[in-house]
Amino acid sequence: MQSWGDPVVTLGGKTINRTSDRTVTFTGPFTIDGFEQELPAGDYVIETEEELIQGPSFPVYRRVSTTLRVDRIPGRPGQKENWQIVPEALDAALIRDGWRG
């Protein structure tokens, strides 16, 4: 959600966004808060999209979305999904899996 006083930067009428990917590894089956499906252990790609907002003197980015790429869904071979998740839910799942940061 955009707050007042933080205008989104546009270039030619388009918002300037950046996307970054990182891989997280779960050592055991896990769930993400807000989703019923238990997922198998393994590597998962997390995609974060951020938009550039007008900072006072330097570029500032605000997170727009966080997506978990699910390439293996038990009982549905070959099906892939992208789950929009809350970053704190991912952190909680990693901590339950034994992640120490």
Image (tube, grey):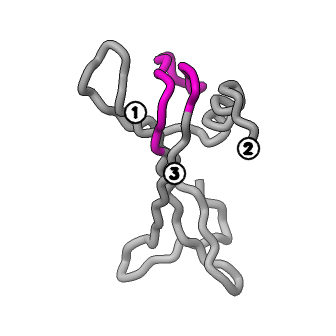
| Magenta region | 26-45
Who comes first in sequence, dot 1 or dot 2?
1
* Tag nearer the camera, 1 or 2: 2
Q: Nearer the viewer, residue 63 or 40?
A: 40
Q: Who's the residue at 38% across and 38% down the image? A: 82
Tell me which corner region of the image, top left, top right, bottom left or bottom right, holds residue 28: top right
Given the image, on which type of amino acid does mark 1 rest?
Answer: Val
* Residue 11 screen position, x and y as percent: 41, 81
Q: Who's the residue at 53% across and 61% down the image? A: 50
Q: Who's the residue at 59% across and 53% down the image? A: 1
For the stretch drawn in magenta, the main secondary structure is: loop
**Numbered label attached to residue 70:** 1
Given the image, on which type of amino acid does mark 3 rest?
Answer: Arg
Identify the residue position indicated by label 3 in the image. 22
Q: Nearer the viewer, residue 66 or 27?
A: 27
Tell me which corner region of the image, top left, top right, bottom left or bottom right, holds residue 86: top right
Identify the residue position indicated by label 2 in the image. 101
How far is the residue under mark 1 from the one under mark 2?
22 Å
Answer left or right for 11 relative to 59.
left
* Residue 44 screen position, x and y as percent: 47, 38
Does residue 42 show up magenta in the picture? Answer: yes
Is label 3 in a helix, a strand or a loop? strand
